[in-house]
Image: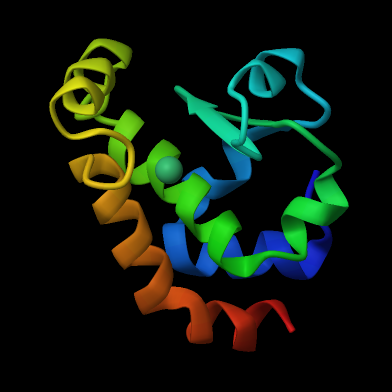
Amino acid sequence: MPPPRTAAALEHIFGEAAAGVIVIEHSRYARMHVGMSATTRPNRILLAGAGARFVADPELVLHEYFHVLGQWRGGRLTRWRYILESMRRGYWENRYEIEAREFAAAMASRYRELAG
Ligand SMILES: [Zn+2]
């Protein structure tokens, strides 16, 4: 569970579904993705490290929640699509990543106000 203010800020931005996202700390699966601090699956965020470190990085929080609630949910993002997109464009130019970065950048100041 994220701290209450973080949870409230996420719910404000993403709606009630934010409360149902499961965040897993110290995930072995996440650590297999070398150089990445987090990875996502349907309704799940897998962290390589501790939750406190994750919560301290607002843009990363928004980015990962966006992958889950804006992309995985509704089936727009699938593992296969992500792999194809990564093969075509790599990580940085991957459209799922571009979208998540843009969302995080656009919402960061609002989120900081809410999450304190
Ligand atoms: Zn991402």
Question: Is residue 109 or residue 19 the one in the foreground?
Answer: 109
> Left or right: where does residue 72 sit relative to residue 112?
left
Identify the residue at horizontal 81%, vertical 31% (top origin): 25
- Residue 55 horizontal/vertical position (percent): 75, 58
Question: Is residue 8 or residue 48 the one in the foreground?
Answer: 48
Identify the residue at horizontal 47%, vertical 54% (top origin): 63
For the image, the number of numbered tags is: 0
Question: Is residue 16 or residue 71 the one in the foreground?
Answer: 71
As drawn, 53 above or below 104: above
Q: Quadrant of the N terminus?
A: top right
> Left or right: where does residue 66 sit relative to residue 30?
left
Identify the residue at horizontal 51%, vertical 46% (top origin): 64
Residue at the extreme left of the image, as rendered: 88
Q: Quadrant of residue 90?
A: top left
- Residue 52 horizontal/vertical position (percent): 86, 53
> Left or right: where does residue 27 sit relative to residue 33?
right
As drawn, 87 above or below 18: above
- Residue 116 horizontal/vertical position (percent): 74, 84
Ligand 1's quadrant is top left
Q: Quadrant of residue 28?
A: top right
Q: Quadrant of residue 5?
A: bottom right
Identify the residue at horizontal 20%, vertical 20% (top origin): 87
As drawn, 32 above or below 50: above
